[in-house]
Amino acid sequence: MDLTGKVALVTGAGTGIGQGIAVELARHGARVAVHYNRSREGAEETCRRIAALGGETRIVQGDIASRDDVRRFVDEAAADWGRLDILVNNAALQLNLNLYRHDESSYDQIMHTNVKGYWLCMQAALPHMTRQLAGRIINISSVHAKRPTDFDPVYAMSKGAIRMLTREAAIELGHYGITVNAIEPGAVDVGKYKHPRPELPPAAGETLARDDLRLHFPLGRVGQPQDVGQLACFIASDASAFLSGAAIRLDGASMLL
């Protein structure tokens, strides 16, 4: 998965999955524009990790729900290295509100970020990719594009919309040599999951954690940002030239239970 010479933009790359994707793209040779909206410190940490790998990076900032912001930071990312090969739409919002607790404001927040934001970033990237007659667009969705949540129906709706946006765009943009795919992660450890109990010896604690996790995760663990990053690298590489319009579930088989 050699991405040497490729230029990537990852939205929401200051934390969690976005940070993992940005670092893995850089590990495989891509030059990476690290986007953030509010988490400047996180974006700087992502850049430090990339620099430690010997990679090239820069930071771009903006609200992905704002057309003006999106056009500006996408053009900034492309201008630095003269091209844009890979767009990873990752920045998203999850409020964890039940159906009756959502109001118009919270609904608009999620939809404007998770759906409108992806659409705006794709539109802004297209002039650069169509000029090259090549490009990779990777939309980070969720297993909840397929399976309802019991914690936030509006979030699930947005992820379902991303799945269809990916399919429609794959049909339209294939004429320009651009592939569009989605990754649908299950649970990913971005600091929310408990580690083995510290008062137990490490081996015992790890065994208890694995036994508990296997009730919901056949591989005995939740995903890591690096797992998503490695799949993103494959999709971004030449090895996936015939892959487009796909939604790849990355959940360690948890949805089968």
Image (tube, grey):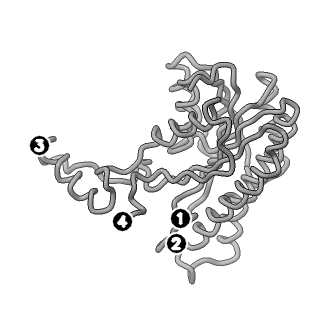
* Quadrant placement of the C terminus: bottom left
Residue located beneath label 4 in the image: 257
Q: Which mark is residue 201?
A: 3
Instruction: From the image, state whether disc 3 or disc 4 is nearer to you.
Output: 4
| Element type where label 1 sits in the image | helix
- Measured from the top left, where is residue 154 in percent x and y? 61, 71
Mark 2 or mark 3, which has the lower sequence index? 2
Please report contact status of discs 1 and 2: CB closer than 8 Å, yes or no.
yes
- Measured from the top left, where is residue 171 in percent x and y? 78, 52
**For the point 84% across and 39% down, which residue is it?**
176
- Callout 3 environment at 10 Å: few (<14), some (14 to 19), or many (20+)? few
The furthest residue to the front: 242
Q: Decide if residue 202 is on the left or right side of residue 23.
A: left
**For the point 72% across and 52% down, which residue is it?**
118
Residue 206 against residue 236 in the figure, above or below: below
Report, in whole angstroms, how far the alpha carbon at label 2 lies from the one at label 3: 38 Å
| Element type where label 3 sits in the image | loop
Report, in whole angstroms, how far the alpha carbon at label 2 lies from the one at label 4: 14 Å
Mark 3 or mark 4, which has the lower sequence index? 3
Asked whether 36 or 17 is in front, the reply is 17
Report, in whole angstroms, how far the alpha carbon at label 1 lies from the one at label 3: 36 Å
Instruction: From the image, state whether disc 2 or disc 3 is nearer to you.
Output: 2
- Measured from the top left, where is residue 91 in percent x and y? 63, 49
**Amino acid on which the number 2 mark rests in the picture:** Pro
Quadrant housing residue 10: top right
**For the point 51% across and 26% down, which residue is it?**
49
Residue located beneath label 2 in the image: 148
**Amino acid on which the number 1 mark rests in the picture:** His
Report, in whole angstroms, how far the alpha carbon at label 3 lies from the one at label 4: 30 Å
- Callout 2 environment at 10 Å: few (<14), some (14 to 19), or many (20+)? some
**Amino acid on which the number 3 mark rests in the picture:** Pro
* Quadrant placement of the N terminus: top right
